[in-house]
Every structure is written in structure tokens, then in C-alpha cells.
Amino acid sequence: MSMRLLIECARARPDDGAIRRAAAAVDDWERLLEQADRHGMGPLLCWRLERCPDVVPAAIFGRLRDRLHAGAANSLKLAAELGRLVALFDQAGIEVAPFKGPAIAWSLYESPALRQMSDLDLLVRPADAQRAADLLVANGCRPGYGTDLRFFGSNGELPLTSPAGVPVDLHWALAPACFRHALDMDGFWSRLVTVSIAGRPMRSLAPEDLLVFLCIHGAKHFWCSLHWLCDLARLIDRRALDWDALVEYSRARRVSRTVSAGLLLAADMLGAGVPPSILAGARACPHTARIARRAQLWVGGRPVPRGPRALEFRFQLSLVERPSDKVRLCWGILAPTPAELESLSLPRPLFPVYYAFRPLRLMAKYSRLAARRLFS
């Protein structure tokens, strides 16, 4: 019953009566708090329940208020750090576009404190990626695994930590290699819009581009966190979207399954206002309907697959529509990652050796795991 309450609170157009009924039916408030934290819903849950505090145990409501206050303080901290980093990029003449986190919190939520977030995501052009990474390091950011971008090419992002202790993800792509075709990066930059973050104007993704990205990002992670779906539903209900252009774009870019599945989830679970004609087309596609059914189970609380297992691979493969991108997905499994760098340090000219080392490392890792399960 606790997931029902979280889902009611995640709606962009909530029903106070439904929230009250769902709250009254909760029989394990500790479990609710655990699920709210796992789904990034603590601050939003508190804000919704303030309309019916009489059905919430006082001690639980006090802990929820703590989460709301912590969310407000964290939002201000992240916004301040974002402003500092964007100023560095501006001074260096590097075009940067913040997205996710503060950009969504300040533009789609009644208060940025309601959107739980823990890091900053910065997008730069691929040609500027190395210069941007060097700039961040020169100004006190600590990379988690060095700054050799070849080890991060499969996802196109470099993790760092700012001097203020804020995790920062520097992106020069918005999806894994098997989905790069779905995102018109040159078009992204020409369509950027201005959003206000803590009173400062910044450039971020246009609504239609953000919708495609959110659908891909959610699917890549099995839609296992409700707040990602909450972002998508709010975008649908609070922005004037060019639906015809979205449909045409997703078909042309061979990503209609992933986008349509995200729209189905947002409409069926959170009541987002997706046009009926688009929903009808999505339901008529067996691939899309199957993806949405699986994701709905994961959003609803079923444990999601972890690690490079068969279920994960099959689900990811079902999202990819072009044969060439299925090959890229398979090849991406063998692309060197920071784990290889941690296991074997080689001079930069010997980087190609990591393509042979990675499958050997994975074979050894999963052989050990299989042996433990067999003899445990």
C-alpha cells in the first residue's frame, strides 16, 4: 500500500482525496520511508501529506519534514555550486548546458526543494570535453578515476567531485553508444532554452529534447526510481509540447519504442496528459506494450536486475530498434571502463590492450561469483 501513496503523490495533478485514502491504508510507515528514500520521493511526499497530517503518525511526519528541510538546503547548495561552475565555463569560452537536477527542479516543480537530487549534470560539446575536464580539475574538482576520456566513452560522461563535495557528471553525450543515434546533438545545441535556476538564467534542453532524453534515461535504468517518471509526467503536463514533431522525430530516429513506453508509463501510472492518439498507437505496438509492462513492475517495487546479467541485456536489447545499434550495444559491453584501469595500469599508448583485457577480467569475475554460489 505504501507504493500506492507514493504514486498518488508523484502525480503532477494530484487528487487530495486519493492521497488521503492511500495514506490511511498504509500499515507500515517505516517501509514507506524506506521506499520514499529509494525513489527520491521524501520531500514531495511530505509536501503532499501536509494536506492531511491527521492520518500520518506524528513521529513519521516529523521525519518527513526533516527530509523536506534537508531537500531545501541541498537545493540551494547545488544551485550555488552550479552557478560557480557555469561561470568558470563562461570565462573559459566553453558552452555548457546544465540538465536534470536543478534545471528540472527549478523549472518543473512548485519548489526546487521538492525534487530530490544529489549531483550536477553538465553537458558540453564533444570537441570541448577534454578541455572542460581539465578546467574542472584545475579548479579543484577531483576525478573519480582520472581524466582519460577513452575509459568513459561508452556512456560519454566523466564523474568528478567539486571542492564543495558535490558530485559532478561532465557529459559530452546524453546516452550510451547504442542510443547516440536517437539524440540529435547538433540540434540540441541549436534548440537550447533559457531556464532560471536560483534567479540566474542558464541554458538547458528544450522540452521536446528533454522528453526524449528522460525516456531513454529512465529505460536505461529500468525506470527503477519513481522520481524519474515524476519528472516526465510534470514535463508533459506543464509544458506545451509539439506532439506531432515528437512522434515524427522518434520514428525517424528509431527510438519510438523507448519514447512510447515512457509515455505509456507516465499516463497509466501518473495520469500524465499524453494525447489519446499517441497512447493508442503505443498500446498497439507489442514491443512498446511489453517494455512498459516490465517497467511498471519495476517502478511498482519489483527488484530490478543488477549487473551484466541476461535479463538486463535482453531488456536493453528490446529497446534498440536498428540492427546496427544492437551490434553497438553488444560491443559496448566490451568497451574499456574505469574498472579495467583500476585492475591494470598501462601507459596511454597501450590503451588498445584493454579491449582484450576486459573480457578476461569479466570472465574471471563471474567465474568467481558462479563458484561462490555453487559451493555456498
Image (cartoon, rainbow, N blue to C red):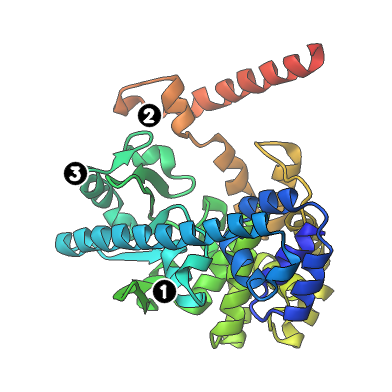
Which residue type does callout 1 highlight? Answer: Gly
The crowd level at tag 3 (other Cα within 10 Å; few <14, some 14-19, many 20+) is few
- Circle 1 Cα neighbour tier, 10 Å, few/some/many (<14 / 14–19 / ≥20): few
Question: On the picture, is 243 further left or further right than 352?
Answer: right
Q: Three-letter amino acid code at disc 2?
A: Phe
Residue behind mark 2: 351
Q: As drawn, is 40 to the left or to the right of 207?
A: right
Q: Earlier in the sequence, mark 3 or mark 1?
A: 3
Q: Amino acid at mark 3?
A: Ala
Rendered image quadrant of residue 300: bottom right
Disc on res. 138: 3
> x and y percent of residue 225 in the render?
64, 56
Q: Earlier in the sequence, mark 2 or mark 1?
A: 1
Q: Residue at x 74, y 49 (%)?
A: 31
Taking the spot 50% from the left edge, 23% from the top edge, the residue there is: 357
User: Residue at 78% across / 80% down in the picture?
Assistant: 17
Whole-number angstrom distance, CA of label 3 to CA of label 2: 25 Å
Label 2: element kind: loop
Q: Which residue is tagged 1?
A: 187
Please tell me which residue lies in front, 90 or 184: 90
Q: Position of residue 133 (x, y in %)?
A: 28, 47
Q: Position of residue 136 (x, y in %)?
A: 25, 48
Name the secondary structure under disc 1: helix
Give me the residue at 80% from left, 11% from top. Answer: 375
Q: Residues within 10 Å of mark 2 (few under 14, many from 20)?
A: some
330 horizontally vs 198: left or right = right
The Cα atoms of the two marked residues, 2 and 1, are separated by 32 Å
Which numbered mark, 3 or 2, is in the foreground of this view? 3
Task: Please indicate, yes or no, whether residue 291 appears anywhere in the rendered image.
Answer: no
- Residue 25: % across, % down: 84, 63
Answer above or below: position of 146 versus 216. Answer: above
Outermost residue, top direction?
A: 375
